[in-house]
Amino acid sequence: MNEASQREPPARRNRRKREADLPPYVQGLFVTGPNDLNPAVVNNVETLSNVPHIIRRGEQWFRTLGTPDTPGTMVLTVSGDVQKPGVYELPMGTPLQELVFGSAGGPPAGRAVKALLFGVSNPVVTPSRLNTPLDFGSMQKIGSGLGSGGVIAYDDTTCMVQVAHKLSEFLYIESCGQCTPCKFGTNQATYYLHKLVHGLADRHDLDLVIEGAAMAPHANRCYLPVEHSLLIPSIVHTFADEFERHFMTGCRSCRQIAVPKIVDFDAAKASFAYARAPMTATNSRVSSESSREVHHVRFSRGRRTP
Ligand code: SF4
């Protein structure tokens, strides 16, 4: 036993050991024995809200909604560049097109959909995938995922470099810093995207964005850096031409993009209120590269190497 674990209170140490040896999602919260499985399903409100209906009407009724692999309905929140942003409950398997154009009214008049994000935890979805059924299996087949049903729509005036930068920065800030590769990797990707936004980056910097994203999920305690490693490279690869066009010019003529962080819903106007998130980098060239710090550290098998 090392010195740190000797200082840990016995109760906490025992609990940690028990959770490691007998995880709640396998054994249950109240452990009765290694062969006595009683898994605890810790679910969210949306899942629990289905329970009374299933008990009252039966499992077979529930399975009449949705698809065989994803029965029931899902609450989907659509924000960003759509005419009717809002929260919509739809049967699983509803085509993505119906959500974006039917429920949410499609992009503003005269505009086209450019990109759709399912939260910040899955690879970007392009309009060529609008006929995809919204269920877990189908979204996985197109290389993305449903996440928790939060959809951000971007129209064809959107600068995807800024989108990548703002979302990378968001995940970097949210990274709690317990796991060094997570904090350093998300920081590295954000730093080089920041350079790109300001027209100070070249192809090598773009490689360093990808390297930072790949570094982040090493020895991770939670899913955050995995989200980063899925999302950011997917945007860079999908919109590679757009990223290359920013090498010299940056975002001087791009529309300002902010992360659509919902803080309220105005029922009278049927629209979301978003947090004011001023861009640190838009429409003006910065000369200083020192406004952010980046640490060049490489990790191999979770160990820090020079
Ligand atoms: S992996 Fe999770 S726990 Fe570890 S630093 Fe990142 S956010 Fe924190």
Image (spheres, rainbow, N blue to C red):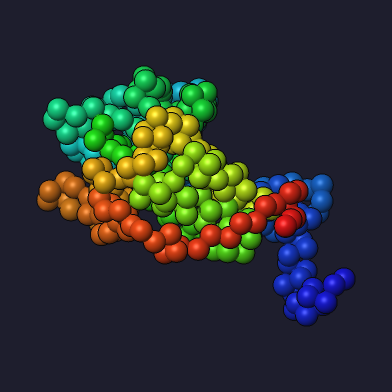
Q: Which sits in the foreground, 81 or 264? A: 81
Quadrant of the frame with the N terminus: bottom right
Q: Identify which residue is drawn at 47% across, 28% down.
A: 139
Q: Residue at x 33, y 45 (%)?
A: 250
In this image, 182 relative to 99: left or right? right
Q: Position of residue 83 (x, y in %)?
A: 18, 36
**Numbered circles on residues, count:** 0
Nearest to the observer: residue 235 or residue 109 = 235
**Side of 284 relative to 214 (left or right):** left
State whether residue 306 appears in this view: yes
Q: Name the image quarter holding residue 164.
A: top left
Q: Nearest the camera: 66 or 63? A: 66
Q: Is residue 151 visible?
A: no
- Locate residue 75, reporting x and y percent: 36, 40
User: Is 180 placed above or below 103 here?
Assistant: below
* Residue at image point 76% right, 61% down: 18
Give the residue at x 83% y 77%.
3
In this rendering, position of residue 210 left or right of residue 49: right
Judge by depth and name the residue closer to the eye, 116 or 35.
116
Residue 217 spot, x, y in % from top left: 62, 48
